[in-house]
Amino acid sequence: MPDDGELTTTATLQPQTDQGGAGVDPAVARIANGPLEIGNRYPFLIAFTIAYLLFSVAMLLMPLPLRERFWSRAADLLHIPAFGVLNFLFLLIARQHTRSPNWVPVLVTLCTVSLSGLIELIQGFVSRSTSLGDLFRNLLGATASLLIFKAMESWPAENRQPRRLFLLAAILVIAIAAAPPLASIIDVYRQRSQFPVLATFSSHSEMERWYVSSANVKRTPIDWLGRSEELKVEYLPGDFPAIQLQQMQRDWTQYRTLATRLTHLADSPSESIVIQLRITDQRRQRPPGHGFIDRIELKRGESIDWRFDFQAAQQQLAADQRLMLQRVNYVEFMAVQPQQKAMVQFAGIRLLP
């Protein structure tokens, strides 16, 4: 009992408690939850995730309406956000049940990637094709969404450094995933701007449009028609070693001649080589091997400016055998049954009026 001259004050501070009695200020709890708080919107999140998953699976299994190179690469690009968004939705759902273990988001991301791999396998049994490139982009898209999720989880923290690192890592992952499709899309526009030049061998993206069979190719620097590359082709012994240019500008109606410069290199093991040029259109009802065909023979060390007048060849064909010059499919340079390796240099390919 204190004396009369003594004044004793006892103050007890009691924290405000939430309904669960956790001893946390509700205002602080709301801040701690940050932008990932779902609350009463959880049923909507579940419904939206299911709808998005079904839509994504349907889009990935249905046939592509257009098979042009631009649209094909644009579809490849869409794999990144498609599985990034799907994985982020899965992460939000998982967070409503557990928030502490760091391995849970990683496990959810691995499940998303496994699902994408299963879809890729199913594509091999329908009208699509299985692609490791698509699986790689699915993986990187899911990884980027995981990094963004971790950045948003650390949003209330006073230290902004982890959040920035997560966001920078996510941007880097997205850039790595998007680089190959974007390079091909850029090459499509470069290809259109260069037309009637069909090939300059000046970029890796252009070389993706060449199909090589029983041959080896290598680009080396030169200067021809203002370009800086040539293509050195090593035809291997066999019946049909060939290189084939695909995915090019298809309308040749305003042009008459295909031109290129060929050199049978002096150090080639073969003394002579016969090169067959073939041009085909996109009509599938034509029998295999049909199209314009021209041949030249090159001695070792010989060079030639090859000019093939395909319009003149068109006039010599019957009406039902003529090619649709507005829908040219590919150009092929095949060595005719070489008995030894033959090394031939191509210095640009273009159309002339």
Image (cartoon, rainbow, N blue to C red):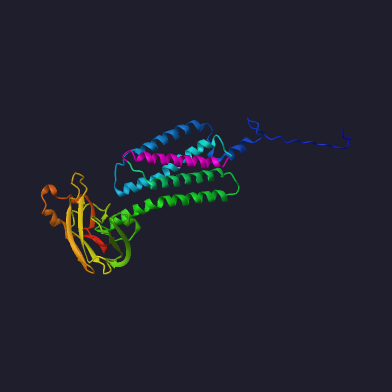
Q: Tell me where the magenta segment starts and ends, as one range.
A: 101-127
Q: In this rendering, does residue 256 appear at all?
A: no
Which corner quadrant holds the N terminus? Answer: top right
Q: Residue at x 54, y 33 (%)?
A: 39
Asked if the magenta segment contains residue 110, the reply would be yes
Vertical comparison of 29 with 208: above or below = above
Residue 174, x across and y down, in percent? 44, 49
Which corner quadrant holds the C terminus? Answer: bottom left
Closer to the camera in the image, 143 or 240: 240
**How many numbered callouts?**
0
Residue 100, x across and y down, in percent? 59, 39
Q: Residue at x 31, y 49 (%)?
A: 69
Q: Residue at x 63, y 30 (%)?
A: 20
Q: In this rendering, does residue 101 appear at all?
A: yes
Residue 17, x across and y down, in percent? 66, 33
Residue 14 found in image quarter: top right
Horizontal relation, residue 260 to residue 163: left or right: left
Horizontal relation, residue 189 to residue 174: left or right: left
Vertical comparison of 330 with 285: above or below = below
- Secondary structure mostly seen in magenta is helix
Closer to the camera in the image, 14 or 146: 146
Q: Residue at x 48, y 38 (%)?
A: 90
Residue lying at the far front of the rendered structure: 339
Closer to the camera in the image, 207 or 257: 207
Asked if the magenta segment contains residue 214, the reply would be no
Vertical comparison of 140 with 190: above or below = above
Closer to the camera in the image, 176 or 300: 300
